[in-house]
Image: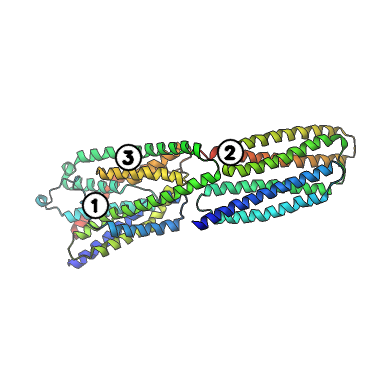
Amino acid sequence: MALEYILIIFLIISIIISFGIGANDETMAPLYGSRILNMKQILILAAIFAIAGALLLGEGVSKSIGDKILLLDYEATGINQNAVVMTILISTAIVLIVSSALGLPISSTHATIGGIIGLGLLLGGGDGVNWSTILEMSMWWIASPIIGFTVTYGVVKLLNKHKLKSLKGFQDFERSENKYSYIILIIICITAFSRAGNDCSNAVGIVVGVGDEINLTLLLIMTGFGLAAGISVLGRIVIKNLGKMTELRPSTAFAVQVPTAAVMLIGTIQKIPLSGSHLLVASLVGLSKASNTPMKKGLWKIIVIWLLTFPIAAILSIILYFPIDFLI
Amino acid sequence: MKLLKEKKNELYEVNKEFLAETLSGSASLHEALSTFVNDKLKRESLEAVIQVEKRCDALKEKYVQVLYRDKRALPFLVEDRYKILMMIDTVNDKMEFFARFLEVYPFKLYKEIKEEFKDLYSACSQAVEELVDCANLIETDFDGAFKKTFEIEERKREARTAKFNLLGKLYKMKDDPTKVYLTSKLVTYMYDIVSWVEETSDYLRGLIIKYPSK
């Protein structure tokens, strides 16, 4: 197949992947839940930051997918590495798109690792997967919702205690909440911007590997648009679902978002693959418990999809590998 | 930002105006009742109560418009403010209804129940006055507003005592049944105002408890 055609196919797949990642981007959920902005405003803002983040931060971020987890000797076994990478990304994108259509936020990291495990088992058997790394990571997967819950619970309790002393009336309350709404807006915009830069690398990586004659700026803009389209088309369902999980207002959205962002930042610095979705959902549960407000029914659906993400992604990658390997 | 500030100020201003009108309606009703117990009903005061209710309706519309425009920032506060407004507006409606009833009440008040009647309308006027204070205080001082709600509860107890003392005397009277019946209605309608004021203050107390720990 001519290089141009391969490039076009990779480009389309790259956009589909970015669409899938954007579709499951729940960053803006606290803004919707606390009703600081309406859905239309949120989607416009999300699209702007997705494109800007992809364009300004995406360059130079090329992720090596699964090199720590997959123990495959590509040269010795003759396994097509491009097919492996593409299978993982496509299966991740499909899992993300389907779960987003159901309004369920999942971890793209989990979906990716599920796909990697599936291919590792398929191509290398039990030895194809670095189980000690998986075990190490799984400890963090269990720990991250607990951290999210605990930190948010503490922050909400502290906020309530502080407010009991300082707020004297509706007008005070209103002023205080207005301040929080500006702060949370800035924090979420920064998060959306950096997340777009990080996310687009997953989509861009595969195309960059095809050849040198690629206009990277144009590619980043396209993936940025893919992310924005994902957020606008399916992401709105996830944002709506998550934003309405419990009663949110600017100060509690702040209590939810700041620990999530802080823990994610620590995770990134320490190279721990934490899930932003898991942290956010756990933080919302922490908020609900700390402020004695009920959780919306349907939390169990999210937990079930979290548990099923690995096996579904693994099975999907096994199914997809053969046709992709055949085509590439 | 400046626009937002202007909107907020407008909301507070309309709210203040609405509460001031409610207070003036209560004062007019008090004036009408003090002349009524002396058998010289001042009908202009009753008309003033009716006019206050009309002005309050217009202010309510204006308030709702401002709330609607300003709904984005804190919807729960908007909802609560809207409910407070509606509840206080019902106080105005009840005062207006009472004023209209008194306008067509064709008798003079029994001498035997005048003291209890005075106690009742004093409690009623004080309760409305305290409710307006409470609604003003809730904007800037939760503690002060919280204390007010207990004072309103006390007014309701006073009104209830006066009402049943009055009805006790009234039902023993062997007079024109229509007069007895309409007088008992007069008393009940007045007590309804106090009762609703107390219900509104209960709601405000609930909000005060809820807000700082919300």
| Residue A2 found in image quarter | bottom left
Direction right: furthest residue? B175
As drawn, the label of residue A88 is 1
Which residue is label 2 attached to? Answer: B206
Chain identity of mark 3: A
> Are the residues under marks 1 and 3 on the same chain?
yes
Which residue type does callout 1 highlight?
Ile
Up/down of A64 relative to A218, above or below: above
Chain identity of mark 2: B
Mark 1 is surrounded, within 10 Å at the Cα level, by few (under 14), some (14 to 19) or many (20 or more) other residues, namely many
Q: Earlier in the sequence, mark 1 or mark 3?
A: 1
As drawn, the label of residue A144 is 3
Look at the image and tell me whether residue A301 can be seen. Answer: no
Residue A203 is situated, as x and y percent measured from the top left of the image, at 26, 57
Q: Front-most of B101 and A209?
A: B101
Which residue type does callout 2 highlight?
Gly
Residue at 31% across / 55% down in the picture? A196
The CA distance from mark 2 to mark 3 is 37 Å
Front label number (1 vs 3) = 3
Q: Is residue A76 left or right of residue A19?
A: left
Look at the image and tell me whether residue A120 can be seen. Answer: yes
Residue B70 is situated, as x and y percent measured from the top left of the image, at 54, 54
> Are the residues under marks 1 and 2 on the same chain?
no
The CA distance from mark 1 to mark 2 is 55 Å
Q: How many marks?
A: 3
Dot 1 and dot 2 residues touching (CB under 8 Å)? no
Which residue type does callout 3 highlight?
Ser
- SS label for mark 1: helix
Up/down of A12 relative to B60, above or below: below
Residue at 65% across / 51% down in the picture? B17
Residue A290 is situated, as x and y percent measured from the top left of the image, at 44, 36
Q: Front-most of A313 and B152?
A: B152
